[in-house]
Image (cartoon, rainbow, N blue to C red):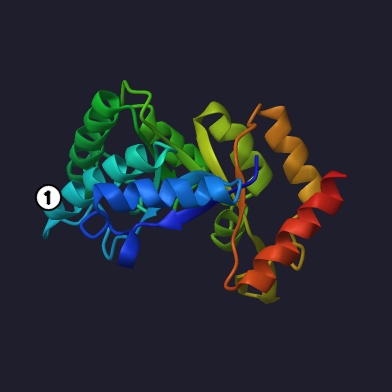
């Protein structure tokens, strides 16, 4: 699959992009022989924050509907840190928000992939296990996991079939106490091992290169092509 993901902001925000605009986007992608792999949903605050929570939930619903119209039926969101204990005040907020979004996804045929990395794979998997739905899963980003001190290869094995989408981004230790994200192929991630692990857990979906400009994106794509050749 050759494709791209987009962010639901600016001209591509659900409030701005009309039905005719959505048709034009689909036509433009087809003209370049591209698939849209996912739509990311930018949030200023997590779903575990009470203030204006319902407005954020409604915005995610709108982006899910946008994703349905544009084709991928998959939305990536950084929902916030998953609470480990029910006594955590954030627990009912996150639970209720994800329940509402899961119901919307089940009704509309769209899925929500939660960005991984703020917590361990075990914590995120355990929290997702509370929901009886096929609409919630994980956006796997090995760089985010490595930056947060988690093993990205073991995390993929823990997530397994919960991975709905994967990002290709690297990370490198820049000081004894700091690891930072870097372009694909310029960090500490063993991409042969990582790709083999994704194959092991039977993830065959998109692997979207993350970059700041066209040159960085192109270099990342070429690197992955060399690794998989």
On-image quarter of the N terminus: top right
Name which residue lies at 30% across and 42% down: 64
213 shown above or below 5: below
Name which residue lies at 77% across and 53% down: 224
Name which residue lies at 31% across and 26% down: 131
80 shown above or below 124: below
Q: Is residue 193 left or right of residue 40?
A: right
Label 1, secondary structure: give it.
helix
162 shown above or below 33: above
33 shown above or below 199: below
On-image quarter of the C terminus: top right
Q: Nearer the viewer, residue 58 or 66?
A: 66
The residue to which callout 1 is attached is 54
Query: Could you tell me residue 214's position as x and y percent?
Result: 63, 70
Furthest residue to the bottom? 175
The image shows a total of numbered marks equal to 1
When asked about the image quadrant of residue 202, the answer is: top right
Query: Could you tell me residue 7's position as x and y percent?
Result: 40, 58
Q: Nearer the viewer, residue 186 or 172?
A: 186
Residue 140 visible to an observer of this rendering: no
């Amino acid at each position: 699959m050759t494709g791209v993901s987009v962010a639901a902001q600016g001209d591509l925000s659900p409030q701005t992009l009309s039905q005719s605009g959505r048709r034009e986007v689909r036509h433009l992608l087809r003209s370049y022989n591209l698939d849209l792999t996912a739509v990311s949903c930018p949030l200023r605050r997590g779903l575990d924050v009470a203030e204006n929570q319902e407005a954020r939930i409604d915005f995610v619903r709108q982006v899910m509907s946008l994703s349905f119209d544009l084709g991928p039926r998959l939305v990536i969101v950084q929902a916030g840190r998953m609470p480990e204990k029910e006594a955590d005040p954030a627990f009912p907020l996150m639970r209720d928000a994800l329940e509402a979004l899961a119901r919307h996804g089940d009704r509309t045929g769209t899925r929500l992939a939660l960005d991984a990395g703020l917590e361990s794979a075990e914590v995120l998997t355990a929290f997702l296990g509370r929901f009886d739905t096929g609409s919630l899963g994980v956006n796997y980003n090995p760089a985010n996991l490595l930056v947060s001190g988690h093993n990205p290869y073991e995390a993929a094995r823990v997530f397994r079939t919960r991975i709905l989408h994967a990002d290709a981004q690297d990370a490198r230790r820049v000081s004894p106490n700091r690891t930072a994200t870097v372009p694909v192929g310029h960090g500490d991630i063993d991409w042969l091992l990582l790709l083999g692990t994704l194959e092991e857990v039977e993830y065959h979906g998109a692997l979207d290169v993350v970059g700041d400009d066209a040159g960085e994106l192109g270099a990342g794509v070429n690197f992955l092509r060399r690794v998989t050749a």
